[in-house]
Amino acid sequence: MSTHIPADELSRYADVIVQVGLGLRQGQRLLVRADLQTAALVRAVARSAYRAGARLVDVVWGDEQLTLVRLQEAPRDSFGEVPAWYPAVTADYLRAGDALLSVYAATPTLLAGQDHDAVSTMMRATAEAARPVTELVQRNASTWAVVSYPTPGWAAQVLPDVPEDERAATLWRAIAITCRLDAPDPVAAWQAHVADLDARCAYMNARRYTALRFSAPGTDLTVGLADGHLWAGGGSVSERGQAFVPNLPTEEIFSLPHRGRVDGVVRSSRPLNYGGNLIEDFTLTFEAGRVVAATAARGEEVLRRLIDTDEGSAHLGEVALVTASSPVARTGMLFANTLYDENAASHLALGSGYRFCVEGGAAMTPEQFEAAGGNLSATHVDFMIGSGLMDIDGLTADGAAEPVMRAGEWAFVLTI
């Protein structure tokens, strides 16, 4: 199956990634983390970055097939080993104020059927080794972005009924639409979109809700919000004052749940791809902020191992609101790729919280962040819960409930 994309279309995508996603500045370096299958996009990004003034574009290549080979052939006691240089290089770039781009386009079920213990050990070790990088990213130490590209394995997974020679092109069209590449001026279209998300964040920050209540079939959940929480969305600003958009596409506004104030039951609305395994139709029960029960129609053991990664992985680190009519949702596709599926539905995340989503968070020690309600973990995994059947209420300090979303759409009107 060919993944050929016309050069002019790749160039438009690369320009959006560099100018909008990374907000690259003259003199910055750029580190790209990508699979070999995405080389065409990486080359286009490098060209765009150099034209934008990058001093150096460096690439750390991966190969998902080598991960599969390792699980099949490596010694059973070796899966806790992680090369130290990889996270060290990434952290060095971020600490220096340079940019980081991750191209995520994995085959969703690549590791299905592999030894669960081996996969879990490998994922846990990788997450732990990457903790310094995770902390830098979550406090926006510098600019970073995550994007995708239509690889053969991904396209085959999400478009099995499309003729093989048309799958990549079909998936690319969906990527182009959701990333606003079909607009006459994609960069301007993104600027307008980010402004709308910023206005919605301002509304939510002004309301100062103490909690959100989610109601849908299979879901009755109250998510307490951290004291001094802040809503963010679309665009972010690095610690050096540089504007960027970390996820392309993005349709969410998000904030920091209080790790000890989540109660009730929530049911997933879309499958979760975790470590090359699909987890489908799952339900989590929370008491005092912690997952106390988990069931899934498929992938339950993988889900339980995710929750058991460390102490923080059984708590929430993010709550995000997305309309059911977002461009990603309107494609009607299940992407089996969190970057896309999380922008089709409101979602939560197990694991670490974002420091910039609480007042003064960037300067907090880990202990102070936890005291404010933030969650610490080596992992951060989004899962989708929203749909056109979901209502969301904001709860005020005096106990009143105000509509935030109805039937998956915004229930408040902006006055801008």
Image (spheres, grey):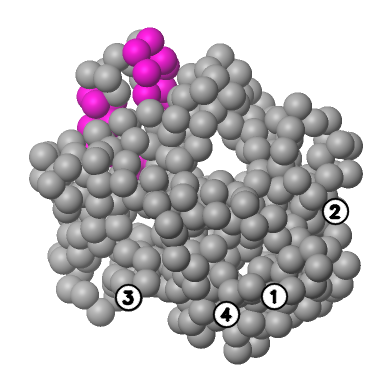
Question: How many other residues sit within 10 Å of disc 3, few (<14), some (14-19) or many (≥20)?
Answer: few
Q: Position of residue 245 (x, y in %)?
A: 43, 39
> Is 260 rendered above or below residue 354?
below
Residue at image position (24%, 58%) is 177
Circle nearer the N terminus (2, 1): 2
Which mark is nearer the camera, 3 or 1? Answer: 1
Earlier-in-chain disc, 2 versus 3: 2
Identify the disc placed on residue 349.
Answer: none
Q: Amino acid at mark 3?
A: Gly
Q: Disc 2 designates what residue?
A: 311
In the image, is residue 28 part of the stretch drawn in magenta?
A: yes
Tell me how far mark 3 sits from mark 4, CA to CA.
21 Å
Q: Is residue 171 above or below residue 298?
A: above
Q: Which residues are magenta?
A: 24-48
Residue 299, quarter of the rendered image: bottom right
Distance from Cα at disc 2 to Cα at disc 1: 32 Å
Task: Check whether the beta carbons of the residues at disc 2 and disc 4 lie within 8 A of each other.
Answer: no
Displayed quadrant of residue 394: bottom right
Residue in view at x 62 percent, y 51 percent: 205
Find the distance from the CA under tag 3 to the CA under tag 1: 32 Å
Residue 391's disc number: 4
Q: Between marks 2 and 3, how big is the CA–CA gap?
A: 36 Å
Q: Is residue 13 magenta?
A: no
Instruction: Please state which of residues 256 and 413 is positioned toward the viewer in this rendering.
Output: 413
Amino acid found under the numbered disc labelled 1: Ala
Q: Which residue is mark 1?
A: 401
